[in-house]
Amino acid sequence: QVTLKESGPGILQPSQTLSLTCTFSGFSLSTYGMGVGWIRQPSGKGLEWLANIWWDDDKYYNPSLKNRLTISKDTSNNQAFLKITNVDTADTATYYCAGGGGSPYWGQGVMVTVSS
Amino acid sequence: DVVLTQTPVSLSVTLGDQASISCRSSQSLVYSDGNTYLKWYLQKPGQSPQLLIYEVSNRFSGVPDRFIGSGSGTDFTLKISRVEPEDLGVYYCFQATHDPPTFGAGTKLELK
């Protein structure tokens, strides 16, 4: 059974760096074809794919935020991470991680609010 | 970026009816390997999206056979035969053929 769970700071101030963690089970990021992606959804709005990391450490970033995103992984501890620098109110959203081959499994999401 | 246009925006149905959702892409979604990376997700109220269909017409593990995906190129359809209460929510199409991956704006399926 594959499960994923996101964690984050809850609230942070503009210009700070948002650090998110995805802790998963049921697959390994050292296995060929596996990957973890990050997606966000502002309240009541649509979905935006942010970044991906794969078993071979290949990474993908959405060009609209590329300069602000860093994705990484800790294979030993079954975790993936996303950092977003210089946040502002537009980054307020629920952040999801999705994993597995083709990232079919999603976590429950973590709400992040950027506010002064 | 590839724009996915979903219609209708909302759909009111009676339980047991068939529902049909369209997703049109601004570019062909056929990848260089010959596959078409078009997925359908359902987001139930208060939950994260769940994968229903991948590569146009393949049902994900555990998805009932009343969900049928079809289409090619730029035009895709999700049909739900015999709508049940647990089918209500927002449906999203999603493409991973072109970078960046993009979602449609969603179609809300609700009871009439």
Image: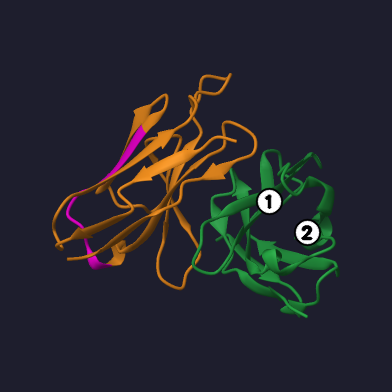
Chain colours: A green, B orange
**Residue at x-position 80% and y-position 67%:** A18
Q: Which of the two labelled residues, at mark 1 and mark 2, occupies the earlier sequence position?
A: 1
Q: Is residue A60 above or below residue B18?
A: above
Q: How far from the left and from the top, in percent, is residue B99?
A: 64, 34
Q: Which chain carries label 2?
A: A
- On whether residue B13 falls in the magenta region, the answer is no
Label 1–label 2 contact, CB within 8 A: yes
* Residue at the disc numbered 2: A82
Residue A27 is marked as: none
Task: Please state which amino acid type lies under the numbered disc 2.
Answer: Leu
Q: In this view, does A82 lie above or below A60?
A: below
Q: In which quarter of the image is residue A38?
A: bottom right
Left or right for B112, reference B92: left
The residues colored magenta run B76-85
Secondary-structure class at tag 1: strand
* Residue at the disc numbered 1: A50
Q: In which quarter of the image is residue A116?
A: bottom right
Mark nearer the viewer, 1 or 2: 1
The C terminus of chain B appears in which quarter of the rendering?
bottom left
Task: Please state which amino acid type lies under the numbered disc 1.
Answer: Leu
Q: How far from the left and from the top, in percent, is residue B16?
A: 13, 59
Judge by depth and name the residue closer to the eye, B99 or A64.
A64
Q: How far from the left and from the top, in percent, is residue A81?
A: 78, 60
Q: How crowded is mark 2: few (under 14 residues within 10 Å), some or many (20 or more)?
A: many
